[in-house]
Image (tube, rainbow, N blue to C red):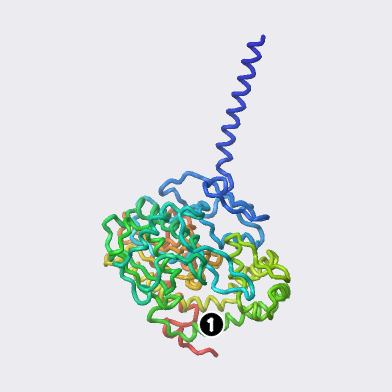
Amino acid sequence: MLLRNRFLLLLALAALLAFLSLSLQFFSRWLPVSMQLKTPVHVLPGLPVRLVPIAPEREGALTAKNRKRIMPDLLTEPSAPDPLYEANLYCNTPGVAERSMEGHAPHNFKLLSVQVMIRHGDRYPLYAIPKTKRPDIDCVLEPDRDPSHPNLADFISHMTKGSEAQMDGTLSSLPRYPSHSLCEMGELTQTGVVQHLYNGQILRENYLKKHKLLTKDWTAKQVYIESTGKSRTLQSGLALLYSFLPGFDWKKISVKHQWSSIFCSGHCDCPMRNHYLEEEQRRQYSYRIKNAQLEKTYIDMAKVVEVPTKQLRASNPIDSLLCHFCHNVTFPCTKNGCINIEHFKTIKAHQIEDERERHEKQLYYKYALLATYPLLNQTVSRMQRISEGKKAEAFALYSAHDVTLSPVLSAIGLTEARFPRFAARLVFELWQNTDKPKDHYVRILYNGEDLTFQTSFCREQERRSSRPLCPLSKFVNFVKREMFSALNSTSYYDACRQKMF
């Protein structure tokens, strides 16, 4: 009898273990990101934890139906705008898992070129809050300090060299990597470097390993690199390239200097663009002074630091507070008290509301059309040359700022896209149908998400097709014609100089 009872007990225990094993296999697909990673993720109090479904991916398995977000999780994105949630996304913590859709296309399509526009990575503030201690952030790169990346140590070693690289204009005098024990204003942080090492790794996996866009014997003529004259953009571009390129060779690196933050090159003379920007700035001011809660918040903060409210507002405190927030550094305090999370939430909430009104009023959209035409024209012209069999760069990188990417997003109609986070990436892919070699297509991706059919020029494209692609002709027509029709004009020159009545 005793032996039988032991047998039954062991049998029940085995059944329980089998049930638990199956349950874990099912629920592990929906673990919080912070439980899926070796690197711990900082979760703020009251902030929803992002749940990521892990599903097998098959090449060419995309359809028009599943191009949309599958089973959106309410914990992933709050039903109403949440300032802390949005701020956390803006910080872009390195190592948080994301599902990248770059390089996905039907099996009979060939990738011909990729053009990437990035915002620099996490940086030290550009402004200081008066009479407060600056955030204590170390900008010396230390591979053993979080956040880190497997390529960080080798990146540092390579950046100490580089004398054979061709750096255009003032870029040659800029440091290749951040190196101050207390970050200088606007300096790229270790977080910013790591963010772009991850970006480069993602692009390498999708474009080089899968599609062989560049081979080990790539040449300088296959790669185009352009950066503004700030150390943070140059360093961000180099970090991405170091993880991306198959064999980082300084002799092949040539970086062109872009003096304009909107990359207008030799086509920057545009009076109407400046007019729309001034009108948009007036709208921002008018909307701000109507916000009583925002004004009260600035008054409270000004009392803490003992400066006039106008002086505090002019110091753009949100820029510094975002640094405190992203690096988990306590907000500034004085003998009169502390700037607190409620102050931060109010200012951030106003930014979100202002973004919504900006889209409604359309002044920024008109500015964006004129501001981005030179860059978009360069992008589409490169695609046209390649589609016609002419020589052009297979990979182009533009290392830029939020004020570069934001108008591009607006101009191409991605009104639902979030304001560019640190290390944001906007990708333009060119594909060829190998069954019909004359047919070429584009895909637009923002931070790894395919937004091709959310663009204004491809929103009406037939979606029943299994091809998640947009005809190149639609993008060409948009840049060459439709952008100007929205401004009641027929060319960039005329749109820039038309008179207002």
Q: Is residue 459 visible?
A: no
Quarter in which the N terminus is drawn:
top right
Judge whether 371 appears above or below 39 on screen: below
Position of 492 relative to 52 (above/below): below
280 up-or-down from 197: above or below: below
| Residue 309 appears left or right of 247 | right
For image coordinates 45% across by 68% down, the residue present is 232
Q: Secondary structure at mark 1?
A: helix
Residue 178 % position (x, y)? 45, 65
Residue 306: x and y, percent? 70, 77
Q: Which residue is drawn at the image coordinates 29% and 67% (left, top)?
A: 164
Q: Residue at x 64, y 15 (%)?
A: 6
In front here: 169 or 3? Answer: 169
Q: Which residue is mark 1?
A: 276
Q: Position of residue 223 (x, y in %)?
A: 32, 64
The answer to whether residue 131 is visible is yes
- In this orientation, which residue lies closer to the viewer: 420 or 237? 237
Quadrant for the C terminus in the image: bottom right
Locate residue 211, reporting x and y percent.
34, 53
Task: Tell me which amino acid carries mark 1.
Answer: Tyr
